[in-house]
Image (cartoon, rainbow, N blue to C red):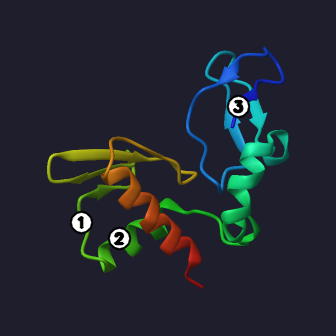
Amino acid sequence: MSIKCEHCGAPYRGSISPYQKFVRCENCDGIIRVNPAESATMKKRLLVRETFIESSKTFKINEFTLFLSRRGVSSFDPVSGVLRLGSQQVQVSTEGAVEGPEPLKSRVEKWIHIFMSEG
């Protein structure tokens, strides 16, 4: 998905979690509304993830920390968002976006999906 800042016109290049409604422009520090209807490709991808978007649950990093500890993962720091497993490390934002190398990134995104699906 490609979105542009409404204020300065710069393209947003960061990752976007399916739970985010806004992102911050890296160029002018303005707020950009994430509109999934902007691109037809994103619309197709969101169709598969429709349950995420319609979920009334919002991502809370402290609750995610408890979720991970129940799964036996104790190497997550909710303050920095850094999760280390073995030699790999990813960073989880307060919105639920994951930055880092594969395959750990995919595993953490799956954990977020399970966490957000729980009642």
The disc labelled 1 sits on which kind of residue?
Answer: Ser
In the rendering, at what x and y percent does residue 28 appear? 69, 16
- Left or right: 96 in relation to 41: left
Compare marks 2 and 3 and give the one earlier in the sequence.
Answer: 3
Q: Quadrant of residue 64?
A: bottom left
**Residue drawn at 24 percent across, 66 percent down:** 74
Q: CA distance from mark 2 to mark 3?
A: 32 Å
**Does 107 appear above or below 9?**
below
Circle 1 sits on which residue? Answer: 74
The front one of 99 and 25 is 99
Q: CA distance from mark 2 to mark 1?
A: 7 Å
- Name the quadrant of the C terminus: bottom right
The disc labelled 2 sits on which kind of residue?
Answer: Leu
Mark 2 touches mark 1? (CB < 8 Å): yes
The disc labelled 3 sits on which kind of residue?
Answer: Ser
Q: Quadrant of residue 45?
A: bottom right
Find the residue positioned furthest to the left.
86
In the rendering, at what x and y percent does residue 22 appear? 72, 42
SS label for mark 2 = helix
Query: Dot 3, how many residues are within 10 Å of its Cα: few (below 14), some (14-19), or many (20+)?
Result: few
Circle 2 sits on which residue? Answer: 68
In this rendering, which labeled residue sits more in front, label 2 or label 3?
Answer: 3
**Residue drawn at 48 percent across, 70 percent down:** 63
Q: Which mark is residue 46?
A: none
**Does 96 appear above or below 12?**
below
Query: Dot 2, how many residues are within 10 Å of its Cα: few (below 14), some (14-19), or many (20+)?
Result: some
In the rendering, at what x and y percent does residue 110 appear? 44, 65
- Left or right: 113 in relation to 56: left
Circle 3 sits on which residue? Answer: 2
- Name the quadrant of the N terminus: top right
SS label for mark 1 = loop
Compare marks 2 and 1 and give the one earlier in the sequence.
Answer: 2
